[in-house]
Image: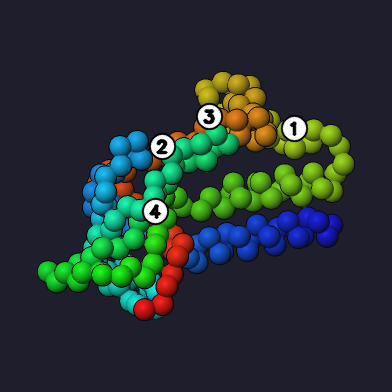
């Protein structure tokens, strides 16, 4: 019971910290991790506090791309890291001579509370009920219930595969951004001014 409670608390705290450091933004430019450009711009759809400085809604942050990480095996998706080169608000442009923060750019995804609860539930059941294969059985039933593949039986087996360690042999996805796409900017380096 203690392991189950600890697992649930850990998952909950991880989801809170992941959202605390992230900023929602809109892509101003197209970008691909397969053919990266040296610069990239984003627009803030709401006020954001970065490095103790408030950036107003519709602020455009022009950045320099400092690192591109392509997709890797283990379902590790591609991402890139940027640092600001200039900040544009209304028609005023402020050059950034010494960048005070770096951001990791990834696609924006809403937190799927149902999937998080299902994952935590499978882990908890696996800890409490010591029956081999109970997690796979739950995955199979979940896949049948979703019926995404058109064939419920096939969907059940597909869900078991996706929830198994075997699925981690697959390569992640490259990042293709189009103008207007929602992005997640995670502050990874924050220097005081």
Say which mark, if any, is on residue 137.
Answer: 1
| Residue placed under numbered mark 2 in the picture | 174
Q: Earlier in the sequence, mark 4 or mark 2?
A: 4
| Residue placed under numbered mark 4 in the picture | 81
Say which mark, if any, is on residue 148.
Answer: 3
Say what secondary structure mark 1 lies in.
helix
Say what secondary structure mark 2 lies in.
loop
- 129 relative to 103 in the view: left or right: right
Mark 2 and mark 3: Cα distance apart in space: 24 Å
In the image, residue 153 sits, relative to residue 113, either above or below, namely above
**Residue 147: x percent and y percent?**
56, 29
Residue 143 in sight here: no
Identity of the residue drawn at 78% across and 46% down: 125
How crowded is the residue under tag 3: few (<14 C-alpha within 10 Å), some, or many (20+)? Answer: some
In front: label 2 or label 1: 2
Identity of the residue drawn at 86% across and 37% down: 131
Q: Earlier in the sequence, mark 2 or mark 3?
A: 3
**Residue 152: x percent and y percent?**
60, 24
Q: In which quarter of the image is residue 191?
A: bottom left
In the image, residue 5 sits, relative to residue 69, either above or below, namely below
In front: label 4 or label 2: 4
């Amino acid at each position: 019971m203690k392991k189950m409670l600890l697992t649930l608390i850990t998952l909950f705290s991880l989801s809170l910290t992941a959202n605390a450091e992230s900023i929602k933004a809109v892509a101003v430019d197209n970008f691909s991790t397969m053919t990266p450009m040296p610069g990239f711009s984003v627009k803030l759809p709401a006020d954001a506090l970065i490095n103790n400085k408030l950036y107003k809604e519709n602020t455009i942050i022009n950045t320099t791309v400092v690192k591109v990480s392509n997709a890797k095996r283990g379902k590790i998706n591609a991402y890139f890291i940027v640092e600001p080169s200039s900040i544009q608000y209304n028609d005023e442009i402020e050059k950034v001579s010494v960048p005070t923060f770096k951001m990791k750019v990834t696609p924006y995804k809403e937190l799927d509370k149902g999937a998080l609860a299902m994952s935590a539930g499978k882990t908890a059941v696996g800890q409490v009920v010591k029956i081999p294969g109970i997690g796979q059985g739950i995955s199979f039933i979940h896949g049948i219930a979703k019926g995404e593949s058109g064939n419920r039986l096939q969907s059940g087996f597909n869900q078991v595969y996706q929830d198994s360690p075997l699925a981690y042999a697959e390569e992640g996805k490259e990042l293709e951004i189009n103008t207007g796409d929602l992005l997640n900017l995670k502050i990874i380096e924050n220097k005081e001014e």
